[in-house]
Amino acid sequence: MTDESSRKLALVLLGPPGAGKGTQAKMIAERYRIPHISTGDLLRDTVARGTELGLKAKAIMARGELVPDKLVCDMVGSRLRQPDAEHGFILDGFPRTVAQAEWLDAFLEREFIDNSHNGKVSPIVIQISVDYNQLLRRLTGRRTCPTGHIYNIYLQPPRVDETCDVDGLKLVQRNDDREEVIRERLAAYERQTKPLVDYYWNKGRLVPVKGDLAVQEVTGQMIQAIEQMSAAEVKSGRQ
């Protein structure tokens, strides 16, 4: 009899800016006791530590170029080999391309073996979908105090318009949060992500959840999806 509690989890989160991926990843990571790996944070950390990969990435970014797939995959591979990811992980921001998704499939097949059922681990890909207008409200409504306090004029407004509740300083809107910038970011995300969504959908790995519900409800959808997909894999492995 297999021990299902020892199963390994490979989770991938997809969702546009403002979908709440970071919030949900933290809660899922705590529940399953697996690390949340944000590739943006991973890249910054690798560069800051001055590793061989970090120095290569730093030189590329200094030229204003995008870090190539191979270098990103090497960084992710190095991170996934760390002891805390032995039983699973949540990837946030990776893969971004079909080539990266194919690399991840090959990595899991080669290095992430699960002996609790059929030996093979495939990623569970959760796509957090949020209404376009809701995303605009979440992102363009953000206001920041110079000392770091964050508000949203639509969803979490200050008591006094444009003024921080804590220290009375004037709130500002970052350039990145202006509507024209946000619209382009969302459009770029859709263009970039569609092939990836199609790739995982065709493999039967994609599970959509509604991200414009209460935080706990979104988490509940994600847990249900993870448990159902995991149970199906265990059953398949026993047949």
Image: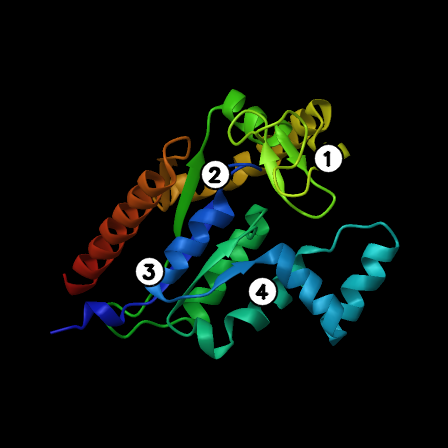
**Amino acid tagged 3:** Arg
Q: Which of the two marks, 4 or 2, is nearer to us in this view?
A: 4
Q: SS for tag 4? A: helix
Which of the image's four quarters has the C terminus? bottom left
Residue denoted by label 1:
176
In this rendering, is residue 1 above or below 94? Answer: below
Q: Dot 4 corresponds to which residue?
A: 76
Measured as percent of width and height from the top left, residue 52 is found at 75, 75
Residue 123 appears in the figure:
no
Sort mark 2 into few (<14), some (14-19) or many (20+) by Cα contacts within 10 Å. Answer: many
Q: Secondary structure at mark 2?
A: helix
Q: Which residue carries the number 2 mark?
A: 197
Question: Residue at 58% of width from left, 65% of height from top?
Answer: 76
Q: Nearer the viewer, mark 2 or mark 1?
A: 1
* Left or right position of 15 against 123: right
User: Please, what is the three-letter code of the amino acid marked with disc 2?
Assistant: Val
Q: Which mark is residue 42?
A: none
Image quadrant of residue 175?
Answer: top right
Q: Earlier in the sequence, mark 3 or mark 4?
A: 3
Q: CA distance from mark 2 to mark 3?
A: 26 Å
Q: Residue furthest right?
A: 63
Q: Nearer the viewer, mark 2 or mark 3?
A: 3
Return the disc, 4 or 2, that comes first in the chain's sequence: 4
Classify 77 as above or below 168. below
**In the rendered structure, which disc, 2 or 1, sits on the residue that comes first in sequence?**
1
Callout 3: SS: helix
Instruction: Count neighbours of disc 1 (C-alpha within 10 A) and say few if under 14, some if 14 to 19, many if 20 or more.
Output: few
Residue 139, image quadrant: top right
Query: Which amino acid type corresponds to the residue marked 1 in the rendered image?
Result: Asp
Please give the name of the residue rendered at 22% of the width and 69% of the height, measured from the top-left corner.
Answer: 5
Name the secondary structure under disc 1.
Answer: helix
Tag 3 residue: 31
